[in-house]
Image (cartoon, rainbow, N blue to C red):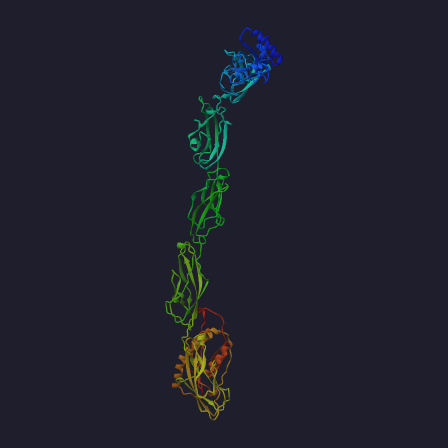
Amino acid sequence: MDVHRIIQPSRRYVSVFLLFSAVLNMASTVTHYSIPEEMEEGSIVANLATDLGLDMKTLSNRKIRLDTIANKKYVDVNKDTGEMYIAEKIDRELLCNMKTATCFLKMEVVLENPLRIFNIELEIMDINDNAPQFRRDTIHLDISESTPLGERFSLSNAVDPDIGANSVKTYHLSESHHFGIEIQTGRDGSKFADLILKKALDREKQAFQNLILTAVDSGVPTRSGTASIIVHVLDTNDNAPYFEKESFRINVPENSPIGNLVVKLNATDLDEGSNAEVIYSYSLYTSEKTQGTFKLNPGSGEITVKEMINYEDFRIYDMEVIATDKGTNSLSGQCKITILVTDMNDNHPEISIKSFQSPIKEDIAVDTVIAVVSVSDKDSGENGIVDIHIADELPFALRENSDNYYELVVSEPLDREKVPEYDITFTVTDRGSPPLSDNETMTLELLDVNDNVPQFPKSFYTIPVMENNAPGALLSSLTAFDPDLHENQYLVYFIIEKEIVNTSMSMLFSINPENGNLYALKTFDYEIEKEFLFHIEARDSGVPPLRSNVTVHIIIVDQNDNTPVIVSPWRVHGSVVEEKIPRSTDKGSLVSKVIAIDTDSVQNSRITYQFLQVTDATLFSLDQYNGDIRTMRMFSYRDPRHQRLVVIAKDNGEPALSATVTIKLSTVETAVKAYSDMTEVPLEYDIFSDLNLYLVIGLGSVSFLLLITILVTCVLKCQKPMPSKAAPPSRNSVISDRNSTIADSTLVSNDAYWYSMFLAETRKGKLVVRQPVPKAGSRYIVSSLPRSTGLTETSESAASTLQGSTTTGSGSSSS
């Protein structure tokens, strides 16, 4: 039995052990004890008194003590009993070098009275109280994935403070497909393990491996310790970069702004570090045009727009991009990219006028082609489909001739006089969204055709001309209008010839052939000529010429140029007329009748009568319209025998003209005999009009005055009045011969009586005509002819001759 074997510290075993040690060391001076480490405090190691043969009775007197050669006092002795016991728990690994096979604690037992020293040696026996420990809990190993199989990697060995069988015996490795261990024994007998690569590593599949290394001792009970082995699989450049797809098709709208991102490439490299850093570049397969249009960022793989993209210039870009890693032996991968430029509606449609005919004649036929235009648009699809139109109100239409070619044709008759030229705007619009449009305007000029007849503003001109006009005076401007142009517009004016009483119109009027100014060539007298009716023609200079005419009605306007002439009562000499009146004349009796005529017309011939002087204003009255002088009362003995009346006859012209007559009335006691008997035969012949009545009176009076003056003079000088046998006494009458028209209403007789009757009858619409009764001597027929109401041209007026004779108071004779 091995005496150094560690046993449990019981009192029985210690006594036996000490006894056995005392027997073995009887011949030695050193007393040897062996105890296991880690005994509890107070455990009895041995009884020194017994083992050293000391008297138990004298121990307390001899002051037994135990001196330990150590920093700590692990054991002590009982002074009374001499027992040595554990004062402090002993840890062999702390007390001694753990690699030392034996561990002793040397002490001295000192006794006094007498002094005696005993050497004691206490061997501390190892027990398995420590588990194996690794210096590091984690072991990091960097192993390249390209390491060949069987490669060894040294591992840190585990340390166990215990010795012998209690120290490390073996190692265990956790389950691993790639690694195994091999136990090695060192020269000092220590155990260590080597890590061996059994299967090739692949960092891309497993970059890290966690292994557990366990160190186990052989003590009882067995103890173990573990360490974690972290294997870092180091990368080698064994993977080339690759793209997620081998080819890409990308749509990019044209006109994308410069710098706009097209695509971001992402090449993947399963390696790491520099082996996984990728640089992008274009391959030689990529054209310079593509490289100039798109920029490739070598670091990020972003492809951006470098220059403006125009769909109409280039529609497809092909490129090949290479991704290369930065490994020592660099690897690369590539992909193909096709960029399709999508069309944007960025091009305005265009219009081109291929042919254009201008000017054109206004009478061009409908459906004639006058222009050919083409349209185009550089865009595609709906963006490139072009519609063309013109304004709806134009007399033209577009007709498609062929693809993108259109003809402009005349759709309605043209009229230069309405629209001389057209601005035709062609508007082209594509069908994009939003649509773009453009326009082109051309001016179409129309050439004139002589298709318009000259036109007068009015179809009938009534031109009033004041009589007594100056020859050559401008009467009116008869200007016609021709909407044509140039020679088709140049007008020439003519008077259409017409004779008036064997007088040509060109002798009376003249027209300027260039401007249509109408002139009078003579001075007109209303009392002779009252109106003219003729035609003016306007003719253009076109080929053939076109013409039109207008009717001109010249009306001679009367002036107040004739003074009233008093024809009754008749005055032989001067302006004084002597009349006799019975003094017994009743109130209201006609005393005398003042009659004045005016050859003017209308207002200018209207006569009114007034007293300028009257002897007794209470005796006579004067009718201002018919000139009747009547008594207002009967004569009295106080009234003077002679009465003087001055009457003025004034027309209604402006300024008014007048004539006066002085009537000297003498009252007599006997009545004045009546006028000679006359046979008055009313002959109704309605030939006068109200308008011409005054003209007849005027014209007749002028001729009448001249003739009567001559006749009266002759009668007074050559013939003495004699009483008539065939008729009662009557006033002298002078009849003049005068040619006149019925329309002029010419007065036949200037005798006051006949003139009075003439006025009365003409107011009834009749003309009074006095003619000598055939074979009747001094007897006359007084006829009342109906007045004419028809308007005839002066040149067509019929002439009529009225004749008369003269009679004396007592007889008849022809003069």
Vertically, is 363 above or below 30?
below
Residue 329 in the image, given as x and y percentages of width and height: 44, 21
Rendered location of residue 447, percent (x, y): 42, 51
Occupied quadrant, residue 74: top right
Quadrant containing the C terminus in the rendered view: bottom left
736 or 530: nearer the eye? 530
- Horizontal and vertical percent position of residue 725: 47, 88
Q: In this view, which residue lies farthest toward the right?
A: 12
The tally of labels here is 0
- Nearer the observer, 89 or 772: 89
Q: Residue 526 in the image: x percent, y percent?
A: 42, 72
Instruction: Locate residue 483 relative to residue 52 in the image: left or right.
Output: left
Quadrant of the rendered image containing residue 297: top left
For the question of whether residue 494 can be seen, the reply is: yes
Work out whether residue 299 or residue 807 is closer to the camera in this orientation and state it: 299
Q: Which residue is depicted at the point 45% across and 81% down?
A: 609
Judge whether residue 159 can be spotted in this image.
Answer: no
Q: Quadrant of residue 128?
A: top right
Q: Is residue 721 above or below residue 387?
A: below
Which quadrant of the rendered structure holds the N terminus?
A: top right
Between 724 and 609, the one lying in front of the other is: 609
Residue 555 higher or lower than 657, as above or below: above
Q: Residue furthest bottom?
A: 637
Compared to residue 154, the image places residue 437 above or below, namely below
